[in-house]
Amino acid sequence: MNASRITVDSVGKRYRPQSSWKARRKEMPWALRDVTFHVGPGEMLGIVGANGAGKSTLLRLLGGIGRPTEGKISTNGRLGALLDLGGGFLGDLTGRENAMLAGVVAGLLRREMNERLDEIVAFAELEDFIDEPVRTYSTGMMMRLAFSVAVHTDPEILLVDEFLSVGDLAFQAKCHAKITAMREAGCAIVMVSHGMDQVRDLCDRALWLKPGEVAAFGSADVVSNLYETEMRMETLRRTPSGPGRKLGSGIDLVPRENRFGTFEMEIVSVDHPASIRSGEPLAITLGYKAPKRIDSPVFVVSITREDGTVCLDTNTLLSRTEVPDLTGEGKLRFLLDRLDLAAGQYFLDVGVFENEWKHAYDYHWHAHPLIVNGAPNHKGLVAPPSRWEMVR
Ligand SMILES: Nc1ncnc2c1ncn2[C@@H]1O[C@H](COP(=O)(O)OP(=O)(O)OP(=O)(O)O)[C@@H](O)[C@H]1O
């Protein structure tokens, strides 16, 4: 039981150029180099890194697709892989037929799959569509089916590529619960993710890849913090110095003081009440301006206390709000049904980020004050509705 499910020893991968004789003589760069780790039963490893860092290459190698150019990978256990969000399905076959096929490919008998199909379909919430061809499915439906099949084939090793970024919140919660149950049953999981919160929440350890090298490997908390620190440094490096700008609300924004980013896209207005009573709703409307098209940026809102304590920190990725590619000017609203904070002085920090968190386009830090009044019967940070009762 204690033996590793996955052992990766000094693995490197260099693709062979396919195109011309001339290209073939040129050496390709290493897509991966010197990667070493192991994943034991019940452990979960997150792989993080920017585009082209080698995450999918590593996941594919773990799944037995292709061979490492150097080093050795050994796996010990039945493999379930979810590498391309259901892209492996055949469009003309129905959901049921595809599920059956995927299960048999994963090593189950047809009889075993027949017994599990109802459960698979119910988990994927596709009862009404399972006999339709999958070409009529949305990406979300395909992903739900692929995930459901993968987790119902009793894998001892599960490889997943970004699956948790698709689908609604309720389904995500179900996936999380299923993953926890699988880990408790001894399944080793490797997940590629761009979301550091997800890595922190779900994974024990994380591997940060940069093109051709391992940038860090260790506890999920430490590695995701390092990754985020690098993102902050990159934002600072890219922030041009220049004149400040006054927002309509009278707020002064000064680059490198309370404003950071490349400013390829800007937050041009932040509308919110200057003060609210504890327990009231809060709406923050962000006006943006993007002279050139920005691919699905991530909007961020956090509420911090004067002393730097973060009271709330959320973003469109975390709340699974799809932000389309944006050009020109527009607005976006963040709504909090109630803000149960203790009375005091807070700041709304707002930002818009590159969709893989590589850097900020525009981030306003401690520029927008918010005063919370009321809540006389609470000390501390939060002040939800409360009462005392004598128990007899
Ligand atoms: N089949 C292939 N043939 C040649 N080069 C490839 C192939 N697949 C990937 N590469 C190259 O290997 C490197 C790593 O790519 P990989 O897709 O593994 O990165 P990634 O971290 O998964 O990126 P992304 O987040 O964009 O999916 C890149 O330089 C890529 O161009």
Image (cartoon, rainbow, N blue to C red):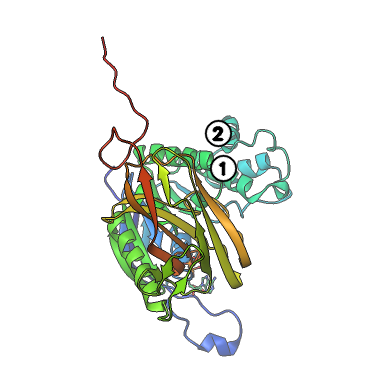
13 to the left or right of 97: left
Q: Quadrant of residue 193?
A: bottom left
Task: Measuring from the top left, give residue 14's x and y in whole percent.
Answer: 45, 75
- Quarter of the picture containing the C terminus is top left
- Quarter of the picture containing the N terminus is top left
180 to the left or right of 226: right
Amino acid carrying label 2: it is Glu
Count of labels in the image:
2
16 to the left or right of 133: left
Q: Residue furthest front?
A: 250
Mark 2 residue CB less than 8 A from any atom of ligand 1 = no
Residue 309 visible in the current orientation = yes
Task: Indicate whether 19 appears above or below 156.
Answer: below
Task: Indicate whether 199 appears above or below 9.
Answer: above
Q: Name the residue: 32% across, 43% down.
A: 343
Q: Nearer the viewer, residue 240 or 135?
A: 240
Mark 1 residue CB less than 8 A from any atom of ligand 1 = no
Identify the mark nearer the N-term, 1 or 2.
Answer: 1
Badge 1: residue crowd in 10 Å (few <14, some 14–19, many ≥20): many
Numbered disc 1: secondary structure: helix
Marker disc for residue 103:
1
Amino acid carrying label 1: it is Gly
